[in-house]
Image: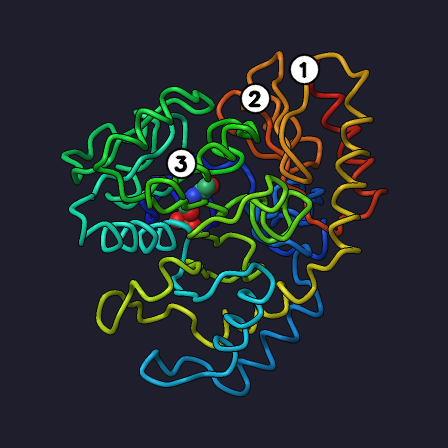
Amino acid sequence: MLTKQADQAYVAGTYGRFDAAMASGQGAVYQDEDGKSYIDFGTGIGVTLFGACDPGWVKAVTDQLNTLGHVSNLYYTAPQAKLAELLCQRTGMKKVFYGNSGAEANECALKVARKYGESTGRNVIVTLRNSFHGRTIATLAATGQDRFHEHFGPFPEGFRVIPANDHDALEAALTAGDVCGILMEMIQGEGGVIPLEPAYVQLAEKLCREHDILLMVDEVQTGNGRTGSLYCYMQYGIQPDVVTTAKGLAGGLPMGACLLGERCQHILGKGDHGSTFGGNPICAAAALNVISRIDDALLEGVKAREAFIRQAMADCPGHQGVTGMGLMLGIATDKPSAEVASACLRDGLMVLTAHEKVRLLPPLNISFEALRQGIDILKKNLS
Ligand SMILES: Cc1ncc(COP(=O)(O)O)c(C=O)c1O
């Protein structure tokens, strides 16, 4: 039975898939089961940072697989300890909790905020309208987009959604006296690749300090070099109390992490949280490979590729501009974005959509030649 038929018969129908069954990939090029090639501007939704089957990453993973696979969090394992050390050294955070996804990283952050506020009776978590934080019941409650909520209520209490970039609403929310944390994406990814304004983010940091509220940044999509810094908050000049990340963290294996700063590093104690697979040696070895390769040269390369894309799109009809930072870019297209994405796929280019935009999340090390070829296909399909 063909892949598509078997999938449609037996896999739960939660995904609106493109009409292609992918068979293999190398770097920024995938092949489908019919042997057709595609340039990849999607990295599996921001995951395969160094492209498909990157040799260094594959070696790190296979070496670990051949040494120690799963053993559980009942024992110390070197890859997760080394990774935590590296993440803390590179961010100034103090402790790391590992999960398996972005939603799990955010679930951990929500629990940390609740326990942080417990002694003062504060339990409200503020999030932003148009945000996306995951699809578990609690992370859906945190997500500020009603369309994701349909059918799944009731939701847990203690979430308050405010409009992004509205200073007065932020001040009113954070001075209400019942808030233990605020969770925000620096660039709203699923919401349409919309960066927060720096002055707003800096005000949030100030108010959080003044009112003993945890500033929690969701870097699930923006993190791990994607926007031109190791984590996007670094470009906003702030120091969050909690940083969550996943997607590109392990470069193609499931891993999420919740990084805890000075103020909340001791909040989670024995038995407060856990995960069978979280931080397993294989995913941790993959992430060690990824994080240790995100250096200044790579980040400069991300910015150079962003400049290349912006310049290539500047004089192109059929769109209303490019938003985002680094290699997390959104293009508001005149035609419906889903139509553009399907046409690109037909012509051999994989792109994503986000709301009404075409979204580009190419590999951080994609060659300029592949970038040029992909942009040519995109431009052709915009008008
Ligand atoms: C900002 C943000 N947070 C959380 C998530 C959820 O991540 P996951 O699908 O790994 O649970 C996503 C996924 O798109 C995301 O973009």
- Which residue lies most toward the right here? 369
Residue at image coords 34%, 78%? 73
Q: Which residue is mark 1?
A: 319
Give the residue at x 80% y 56%.
Answer: 297
Residue 337's disc is: 2
Disc sitting over residue 207 in the figure: 3
Of 185 and 261, nearer the camera is 261
Observer able to see residue 303: yes
For badge 3, the amino acid type reads Leu
Disc sitting over residue 245 in the figure: none
Within the image, what quadrant is residue 149 found in? Answer: top left
Q: Quadrant of residue 197?
A: top right
Question: Label 2 sits on what residue type?
Answer: Ser
Q: Nearer the viewer, residue 190 or 173?
A: 173
Q: Is residue 360 left or right of residue 92?
A: right
> In whole angstroms, how far apart are the C-alphas of marks 1 and 2?
10 Å
Which residue occupies 84% across, 43% down?
A: 368
SS assignment at label 1: strand
Quick check: 137 left or right of 326?
Answer: left
Badge 2 density bin: few <14, some 14–19, many ≥20, Cα 10 Å: many
